[in-house]
């Protein structure tokens, strides 16, 4: 969950770093990014702590429609290799898709995210797959009118 929060924060930072002129364009603006990334995680199927290093990359697209609404999408990929404290080696892949929309008055604000993690072990350690979906809507009064979080994990 801590890593999910970090990915959400990274998404927010990418959004905040976009120049206002990019958001204000009627033509979609596309930005790509790629940078090294290190994190520690764990395989809940084996209880093993794993130190990962890899690459975080993706593409952000945003535009402002004719009525002033802002549309933002991000597709991000994290790939990494890791070494566990029990000696197992792991491959990790994560895909995160984000969609944000808000009207010219910033409401409603609609956020949808899907996240799929694959932690694949070399050898006898079990593999781990996580599917997460998040949806939130905030109205013009700042009230959350929809808030859904669904997460399903599988040991394989």
Image (tube, helix red, strand yellow):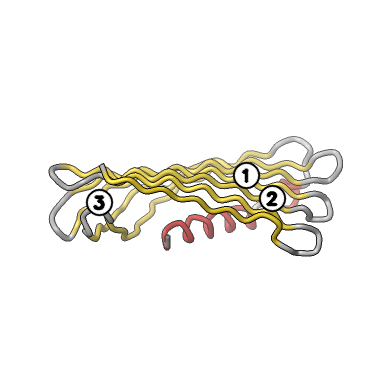
Viewer-closest of 71 and 63: 71
In the foreground, 104 or 129: 129
Residue found at x 43% / y 43%: 116
Cα distance between the residues tagged 1 and 2: 8 Å
Asked if residue 78 can be seen in this view, the reply is no
Q: Nearer the viewer, mark 1 or mark 3?
A: 1
Q: Callout 1: 10 Å neighbours few (<14), some, many (20+)? A: some
Is the residue under label 3 in contact with that under label 1 (CB below 8 Å)? no
- Residue 109 in the image: x percent, y percent? 72, 53
- Badge 2 marks a residue whose secondary structure is strand
Residue 99 is tagged as: 1
Is there CB contact under 8 Å for labels 1 and 2?
Answer: yes
Find residue 40 and report its horizontal and vertical position in percent: 31, 60
Q: Name which residue lies at 58% across and 58% down.
A: 13
Pointer 3: what residue?
Answer: 82
Where does the N terminus fall, quadrant-wise? bottom left
Which numbered disc, 1 or 3, marks the residue that appears first in the sequence?
3
Relative to 4, is 115 above or below? above
At horizontal 49% and vertical 43% (from top left) the residue drawn is 76
At numbered mark 1, what does the secondary structure look like: helix, strand or loop? strand
Residue drawn at x 45%, y 42% as measured from the top left: 95
Q: Nearer the viewer, residue 65 or 42?
A: 42
Q: How many marks?
A: 3
| Distance from the alpha carbon under mark 2 to that under mark 3 | 35 Å
Report how far apart the C-alphas of labels 1 and 3 lie in the structure.
Answer: 30 Å
Find disc 2 in the rendering and name its residue. Answer: 110
Instruction: State the image quarter where residue 12 is shown.
Output: bottom right
- Sequence-wise first label, 1 or 2: 1
Q: Position of residue 16 (x, y in %)?
A: 64, 57
């Amino acid at each position: 969950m801590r890593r999910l929060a970090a990915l959400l924060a990274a998404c927010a930072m990418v959004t905040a770093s976009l120049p206002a002129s990019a958001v204000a364009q009627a033509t979609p603006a596309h930005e790509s990014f790629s940078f090294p990334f290190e994190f520690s995680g764990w395989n809940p199927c084996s209880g093993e702590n794993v130190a990962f290093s890899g690459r975080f990359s993706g593409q952000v697209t945003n535009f402002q429609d004719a009525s002033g609404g802002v549309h933002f999408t991000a597709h991000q990929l994290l790939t990494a290799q890791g070494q566990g404290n029990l000696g197992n080696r792991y491959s990790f892949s994560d895909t995160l898709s984000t969609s944000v929309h808000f009207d010219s008055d910033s409401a409603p604000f609609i956020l949808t995210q899907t996240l799929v993690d694959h932690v694949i072990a070399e050898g006898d350690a079990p593999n781990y797959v996580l599917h997460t979906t998040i949806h939130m809507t905030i109205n013009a009064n700042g009230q959350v009118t929809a808030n859904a979080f669904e997460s399903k994990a599988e040991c394989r």
